[in-house]
Image (tube, rainbow, N blue to C red):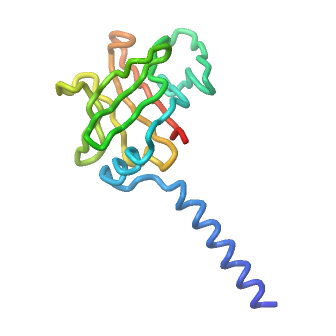
Amino acid sequence: MLFKKTVIYILICLATGLTFACDRAAGTPQEAAEMLTASSRWKIEEIAVNDAVTFKDGKMTQQFGGVDFQRYMETVEIKKDGVFSGVFNGESTPFLLKWQITDKNITIGAAEGGSKGEWTVRPDDVRQDSFVMKTRSTAYDYPRMTTIALKFKAER
């Protein structure tokens, strides 16, 4: 009886460990980059503006007095050569950006360089099947600072 309980306990521990290991966040920017480039394409799942969800399940939700998005990247591809390619809703031509690894995270910005309008992907926001990229800017609701988070899911 004790042996049976021990075996069941070990199996439960292994199953729990595997569940958490599969949904583990990246530990370093390098590991995050490997996870991001492992999926051929990512699809938008959620848009949050100032922590309020404005897009989910393929639908926009109107936020009273908030920033309204009519244009967003439906799918993105993150290539190993540093190219970040995104296709906006209703369009077919990809919009090209550049991604790079820094000491603490991954940044995504204009292909010609410069930090204006840069997006950030933190390692703890990257998992095998999803990632979140964030930015802060006054461009959307000047002079107020707006925080935007885009959550993408791996397209399988």
Residue at position x 49%, y 56% in the image: 24
- Measured as percent of width and height from the top left, residue 94 is found at 37, 22
Q: Nearer the viewer, residue 40 or 58?
A: 40
Give coordinates of residue 150: x percent, y percent: 46, 30
Asked which quadrant contains residue 105, the reply is top left
Question: Residue 136: x and y, percent?
Answer: 35, 25
Work out whether residue 155 can be spotted.
yes
Q: Residue at x 54, y 24 (%)?
A: 52
30 up-or-down from 46: above or below: below
The image quadrant where one finds the N terminus is bottom right
Q: Residue at x 23, y 22 (%)?
A: 116
Looking at the image, which residue is at 33% across and 30% down? 119
Q: Can residue 67 be seen in the rendering of this structure?
A: no
| Residue 156 in which image quadrant | top right
Q: Position of residue 77 (x, y in %)?
A: 40, 34
**123 or 83: nearer the viewer:** 83
